[in-house]
Amino acid sequence: MARTVKRWLSLLAAVSLLLVNAMPAAASPAPYDSYNYNYWKEAVPSPDAYLPERTISGSDLGIGEFKDPGDINVSTSGQIYILDSGNSRIVVMDANYKLLRVIEGFMLDGSKEAFSVPSGLFVDEEEQIYIADTGNSRVVVLDAEGNLVHTITKPESDILATDFQFQPLKLTVDRVGRVYVVAQGVYEGIMQFDENGQFIGYVGTNKVERDYGEYIWRMFSTKAQRAQMVLFVPTEFSNADIDHKGFVYATNIDPGSNEPIKRLNPSGEDVLKRFGYYDVKGDIRFRNSTGPSKLIDVKVLGNGMYSVLDATQNRVFTYDDEGHLLYIYGGKGNQVGTLKTPVAIEQSGDHSLVLDRGKSNLVVYEPTRFGSTVNQAVALHYQGEDTEAVHLWKEVLKLNANYDIAYIGIGKSLLMEKKNEEALGYFELGMDRKSYSVAFKRHRREVMKENFGTFLTVAIVAVFVLILVRLAVKWKRRRQIDREAGLH
């Protein structure tokens, strides 16, 4: 029955998509195929969640072409900061992509200081700019006007090797000024500094994925052979972002890991929820045999959602708070909206920004009706407003009847309203076995409670009838015995 309903909804969705596509669109048609994964880990077509709106280059801003741009950040006020690494400068735009200023250095002890191959930046709530000045082995902190606040150089600590080289690559900052730095060649975790730039320690460590076959082989190998084998060392983090609660989201570049995304609490423990059908790691099946996703950046979107940038397929994967894959967009190519060498992802309002080093430009994506509706529904669910989210989930199903998360969302709303029997059908359509079991137990308890009086009455009558039958049988046997005794 559930499959039949789903087929009819799929047909209606197809008709709706034809009608929607027949209408004029604000953005360009997607130059890439949009898809998602179902319960059986099959890649199935999906409506476009985001479409390319425009691209922005240095020439468009009148400042000359970008050269190997490395990072992008959007401040709380909406200003957009692009780290033009090859030109050793920071380009600042307003929310409408109009040039505001260019920061090419700062004053230090009365002389002009320049950046050297900077690779990461972050802007805090006070518009202070933190730059990972990699070539100069330091983190530079500037105020909103571009004046130097202080620098973070090679830390002094007993836990660091004497020959340690401090080469910061990426960074993020929490609300109290703690700086989290992803540094080159550091496997112990993300380096943490206090608001004064003093080294505190490491946060989070990537788990080692052991190959036990190789481990056994090492036991019987010579010293020379062991030297050539891969060492069991943790992988480096590739990037980091932070949410409003102070949890650090981080990505690592180990293609063999099933946990390339982490959400680190203040104790450094990974608390990322992974309740979806499959691992939170980008592509599940390797499309076009290019290998697993290599996640190089993460952006916290709010309301529990976050996006990760895949350098293998040049795609963006967006997840909700529970680890469900919401949608995928982007791809390889030379058309507007496709990417050559993406390096960073950001959010400006409801638009998504992806910095493409290969094309030396910034790609601006805007949400479609489908993507916007999914975002709104997920936000309401995260805020505990499941009842208000139902009409949005139904709108999503009109556009994509195979969108399992929408069925689950409606089912959870019905579950909260104690409509357990109705919820069962939606959880079945969404292939959510865990929630289905919860709804089934509640429904069974509900049925028992509603019919308890009837069950009790039937049970009492049955017991009473059984007693009467037993008494009648005994009486009949005694009469028969007395009759037989009278004959003798």
Image: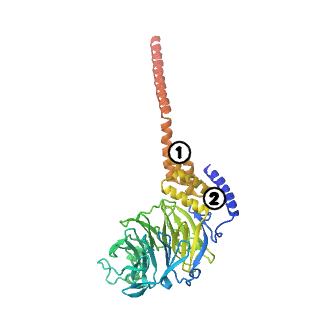
Nearer to the camera, 285 or 183? 183
Who's the residue at 35% across and 65% down the image?
A: 267
- Indicate the colouring scheme: rainbow
SS at circle 2: helix
Q: Position of residue 258 (x, y in %)?
A: 47, 67
Q: Is residue 93 left or right of residue 131?
A: right
Nearer to the camera, 208 or 47? 47
Nearer to the camera, 101 or 458? 101
Q: Amino acid at mark 1?
A: Lys
Q: Which residue is mark 2?
A: 399
Q: Position of residue 220 (x, y in %)?
A: 39, 77
Residue 241 seen in the current view: yes
Residue 189 seen in the current view: no
- Check the image and report above or below for 474 versus 51: above
Proximity of marks 2 and 1: CB atoms separated by less than 8 Å? no
Q: Amino acid at mark 2?
A: Leu
Residue 419's label in the rendered image is 1
| Of callouts 2 and 1, the N-terminal one | 2
Q: Position of residue 145 (x, y in %)?
A: 44, 78
- Check the image and report above or below for 259 versus 112: above
Q: Measure the alpha-carbon separation of dots 2 and 1.
A: 25 Å
- Density class for disc 2 (Cα within 10 Å; few <14, some 14-19, many ≥20) is many
- Density class for disc 1 (Cα within 10 Å; few <14, some 14-19, many ≥20) is some
Please tell me in which quadrant of the rendered image residue 36 appears: bottom right
Q: Position of residue 460 (x, y in %)?
A: 46, 28
- Point out the image quarter for the C terminus: top left
